[in-house]
Image (cartoon, coloured by chain):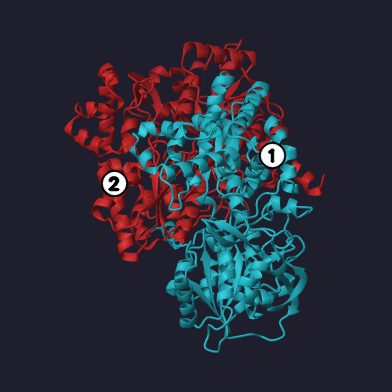
Chain colours: A red, B cyan
Amino acid sequence: MSTLAAQLQQMEAHRSVFENEVRKLPLPTCTAFGSAAAPQAITFAASGQVLSTKDSATVAERFAQTVKASGNAVLRSAGKAPTRVSGKRVAALFSGGPAAGGHNVLCGLKKMLGADNTLLGVKGGPKGLLQGKLFEISDADADSILNTGGFDFLGTDRTKIKTPEQFEQVRQTCIAHNLDAIVIIGGDDSNTNAAILAEFLFSGIKADGSGVQVIGAPKTIDGDLQVPGLLPISFGFDTATRIYAELAGNILQDTRSSLKYWHFIKLMGRSASHVTLEVALQAKPAITLISEEVAEKKLSLGAIVGQIADAVVARYRSKELKHGVVLVPEGLIEFIPEMNALIAELNDLLAHHADAFAAQEEAARPAFIAGKLSAGSAALFASLPGYIVKMLLADRDSHGNLQVSLIPTEQLLSDMVAAHLKKTAPEVPFATQHHFFGYEGRCGAPTLFDAAYTWNLGLTVGALILDGRTGYMASVSGLTSGGEPLAIPLSGLLNIERRHGKDEYVIEKALVRTHAPAMQYFVSRREAWAADDLFASPGPRQLWGPAAKQMPMTVALNDGADALLFRIGE
Amino acid sequence: MSTLAAQLQQMEAHRSVFENEVRKLPLPTCTAFGSAAAPQAITFAASGQVLSTKDSATVAERFAQTVKASGNAVLRSAGKAPTRVSGKRVAALFSGGPAAGGHNVLCGLKKMLGADNTLLGVKGGPKGLLQGKLFEISDADADSILNTGGFDFLGTDRTKIKTPEQFEQVRQTCIAHNLDAIVIIGGDDSNTNAAILAEFLFSGIKADGSGVQVIGAPKTIDGDLQVPGLLPISFGFDTATRIYAELAGNILQDTRSSLKYWHFIKLMGRSASHVTLEVALQAKPAITLISEEVAEKKLSLGAIVGQIADAVVARYRSKELKHGVVLVPEGLIEFIPEMNALIAELNDLLAHHADAFAAQEEAARPAFIAGKLSAGSAALFASLPGYIVKMLLADRDSHGNLQVSLIPTEQLLSDMVAAHLKKTAPEVPFATQHHFFGYEGRCGAPTLFDAAYTWNLGLTVGALILDGRTGYMASVSGLTSGGEPLAIPLSGLLNIERRHGKDEYVIEKALVRTHAPAMQYFVSRREAWAADDLFASPGPRQLWGPAAKQMPMTVALNDGADALLFRIGE
C-alpha cells in the first residue's frame, strides 16, 4: 500500500484530519467552574427569581414533590461545593432529533463527575432507557467524541415515556443499574418528559427509599426552547443555522453568477421561524417569509404570493434582475389563517363523509369536497395546484390530522407565483429551483459557540447532580460576559395544553417575537436587501482563525449584545 | 441604531466577517513568478512534449495557423521575461456553470498585467462578448473579489460562439475595444470554443493586420477536464467536493444518530463520476455507485438494485443497522447499457410514431409503446415505476432526445430497492430520504487549494498573454512540489465527435479511470466501509488552522503524492 493510501485508511471511522484536530481545541470554561482541565463542582442556591405560568397552581398539585423542593426558583451558583460527592451513578440519553454539541454535553458531564462517580450512556434514546441498554462511558470515549457533531455515540429516538408500564420500566432500569440520576438531553417535549420523570422518581425508588434525580439539557436546532433572560438559546441552533446560512449564501452567489433562477429554499425548524430569521440575517436574501408575521398580519396565501410576485417584478423592471432567493420556514402553512381554516374543515369533512368520499372516483373527489366547503375555503381550495389538492385529500394520520410538514411549501409558492406572473406580468422571466435544507444541518461539527456552550451545559448538569438537585434544566446565561451556569426549575415552565382531546403538560414553544430587536432589525433592512441585492456570503463555519468566534445574530440582537463575539470563559 | 445593528449593516453586500477575513489570506505563488506581492512575467518555451489525438491530422488542417504556431507542444517556463510588455488590452469572461476560484483567476491575471496593461471584464459570459459588454477592472475590484466564491463579479452564461454572425460580432468587439487578448474561463466546451476563436482571431483582426490572442483557463466542478501529467484537475472541483463531502458526512452522522433512514444522495457532476468518487473517499459511506464501473461491468438496473438491496440486508442481519447512505452520480442512467438502449429505442419510436402515440389516451400510451419495444427493453420498461415511465414518454428536446438529467435517479433506485426488499426480505426495515447536492457546491468560497491554484492559473494566463501566446490553456502542475506554470496547446486536445448528426471538434471529457489508483483504493475499502460503518465526517472546509491545507484525495492518489498537503509556492 502507498504511504498516502495508508494515511487515508487511518482517517476511517471518525478520524478525518478535521475530526482529529477539533478534538484538540481549547474548551472555554465559565469562571464558576475554574479551569477546563480540572473543573470544580459548585453548589447552587435559589435566586429570588421564581417562575410561574398561567397553570402553576395545577402544576403544583400534579408535581407536588418537585415543586415543593424547588419552589420553582431559579438556581444560581453559590460557590465551590463544600464537600466532594462521590459514588453517584448517572445515566445520560439523547431524545428527539439530533443537534450539534450533544457529545460535548456528555464530555462536560463526564469531566464534572470525575473518576469517583460513574457516567453511563443510554443507547438509542428513551427507548433504550426502557430496555435498560446502558453502558459505562470511559474517559477515552469522551476524548473520542469531544467537539464532534451528531448524537451517533449513543443514538437517539422519539419515544415518549407516558404509560404506567413505561414508568415501571424506567423504575426497573434505575434499580437494575443502581442509578442515582438520569440526564435527558432534548427539546421541549423531552424536557417536559424530564419534569414528569423527576416527579415520578422523586422518592421511593431505591432500597433506602430515596429517589433518582432527573436533569434536562436544552437541545434543538429549531431554537424554540428559549427562556428570556435565563436560557438564551437551545444548543445546536447556532451550528444548524450557520450550515444553512453558508448554503443559502452559496446559492445567492450562484444565482447572481448564472443570472437566471429564483431559488425557493425551505428551512427546517418546525413551527417557529427562528432558523429562517437567523439565516436571513446572515445571508440577506431578497425575500424571507416569517410565519409569526404572517399570522400576526393575518396574511392570505394569495397575499403572500402577491408580495413575492411584486418583488420579482420590481427587481426585473428596475434592474433587469431575473434571479433571487426566497427563504420559506418549514411551518409556514399552519400560520396562514385561511389555510388553517381550510385544513380544519377538510379534516372534519373527511371524517364525517368518509364512506361517501371513498365511493367517489378519484377525479371526482375534489369537486365532491369543494361543494361542502365554506365559501372562503372553497375559493382557496380552487386556487391551489392539483398536487396540493391531492395531498390535502390524502389519508390522515391516526388522529385524523393532515401531515402539514409533508406539503412542499417551497414548490407551492413558486408555482403560484408563476401562475400569478403569467396573468399579471407575462414579460417577467421567472425560472425556479427548489431546495429543502434540513438533515444536513443537524449533525455537523459544532461551531465554537455550540462547542463551548454545550461543554459548560455538561459541567452544569454534572454540578447539579453532585449538588443533589432534581427537576431542573441546565442553562448557561451571560454568554457575552463570561458565562454563568444556572438551573431552571422545569415545573416552572409547564403549561397545560389540549392535545388530541386530552389535557397535557407542555413547555410552550418559543415563537419569534415580532417586536423583539432581531425581528425589528430584519424588518428595517429587508427592503434594501431586495432592492439592491445586498446579500453576503457567511462562508463555512470556521473553528480556527479570525472568523471563528461568533454567536447567533438573533440571540445577540435580542440580548442587547454590543458585538457578535461570545465570551464564555473570559 | 444599536452598536450591533450598525455592525450588522456593515456586513451587507459581501462584507460578512468571513468575506472580510478571506481577502487578507496569503497567496502562495509558484517560485517561477517570484513573490505574490510583485509577481514577475515569465517567458515560455516549447518542451519536448507534443500532444496528439486520433484526429490530429484533420485538426491540423482546420486549425492551420494555431497548430503551425504551437506545433502542439506543451510550453513550460523559460525564466524571467527579457523585456516588460505594456499597453495590452485584455478581456476576460466566465463561460458555463460557476465554480469556486474564478475570481482569483481574474485577480492573478490583473496582478500579472500590472498597471501598464489593461484588464477588462466581460459581463454575462460569451453573450456579453458578442454584445460588447466590457468594462475596466480596477485594482480595488480585484481586491474586493479576492478569495471569494462564485462568478458573480462578472456573471456567466452558456452561449456557444459558432455561427458566422457570432464570429463577426466577436471581431467587432475586438475592434471596438481595441483588444489584444481574450481570456475564456470555462470547461471542456468553453475551451474548445477558445481553440476555435484562437484560430479565427489568429491574424487580420486589428488595423495592422495582427490578431487577437485567446487563452483558456480550466474550470469545472465536475472534474472532467483533466490531462494526465499536465492538468491535474479543473478548478472548483476541490471546493465543490469538500462542500458535498461535509454535507454527506453530516448526513452519515445524522442517520447513525437517529438510526432509521437510508439516505440516497445524488451528486452533481454531469457524466463523469469524479465528484462522487471524491466524496466517497472523504466520507466513506456504505454504498457508492460509480457510473464508469457500471458501464465497464455492463450492469443492468436490476443488478444495481440487487447490489444495494443485498448491502441493506447484510447490514441489518449482521448488525441490526437500519440506516445508511448511498451516493449516486448524476449521470448514472446513461451508463447503464440497457437503460441507454431503452432510451434510444424510445427516442426512435416516439419520433416515428408521433401521431399514433399522440392519438392514444394517456393511460394507454405505455402499453402502446411497450408493444413496439424489443423484448429486453420491454421487460426493463415494465419494471420501472409509473413516474419514470411518464418521464420516459415525455416531450423530447429540440434534438428528439430525452433530458436524462431530469430523471430522479436517487428516487428511482430507492423505490426499486424498496420493491425488491418487499419481495425478497420483507422483515428488513427500509425507510428513505432523498437529496440532490448541486447548486450549493458551485459558488462556495474557494478552499485554500482552489484559491492558490486559481491565483497561479491567473498569473500563468497573464504571463502567456504578455509572452504573445495564443490557443493555449493555462495550467499549474507539480502541486506537491512548488507548482509549475505551463501551457497546453488547445489544438493538441481536440477530437472529432459526431453530435446531432454533425462532426464537431471537442475536448474529450475525462471519465473516471477504473484502473487508476483512486478508484483502486476505493474498491479496496468499500466493503469494509459498508460492513463496519467506517464513515468519517470531513467537516466544513477550513481556511485557517491545522485542517486547512488539503488537496483532493482522488488527485493526490492518482498523482502518486505521498500526502494530502499541496505545496504550491513552497
Where residue A304 is drawn, which disc sits there? 2
Image coordinates of residue B40 in percent, x first then y, are 68, 78
Find the residue positioned furthest to the left: A375
Of B13 and B529, the residue lying toward us: B529
Which quadrant is the N terminus of chain B positioned in?
Answer: bottom left
Residue A207, quarter of the rendered image: top right
Q: Relative to A56, is B297 on the left or the right?
A: right
| Residue type (three-letter) at the residue carrying disc 2 | Ile
Tell us which disc is closer to us: 1 or 2: 2
Image coordinates of residue B470 in percent, x first then y, are 62, 75
Vertical side of A130 occupied by B392: above or below = below
- Label 1 crowd (10 A; few <14 / some 14-19 / many >=20): few
Q: Relative to B210, is A225 on the left or the right?
A: left
What chain does badge 2 belong to? A
Image coordinates of residue A114 in percent, x first then y, are 69, 31
Pointer 1 residue:
A38
Identity of the residue drawn at 59% across and 74% down: B199
Which numbered disc flags the more N-terminal residue, 1 or 2? 1
- Label 2 crowd (10 A; few <14 / some 14-19 / many >=20): some
Instruction: Determine the CA span between mark 1 and mark 2.
Output: 55 Å
Residue B8 seen: yes
Of B403 and A420, the residue lying toward us: B403
Label 2 SS? helix
Residue B492 seen: no
Identity of the residue drawn at 70% across and 47% down: A17
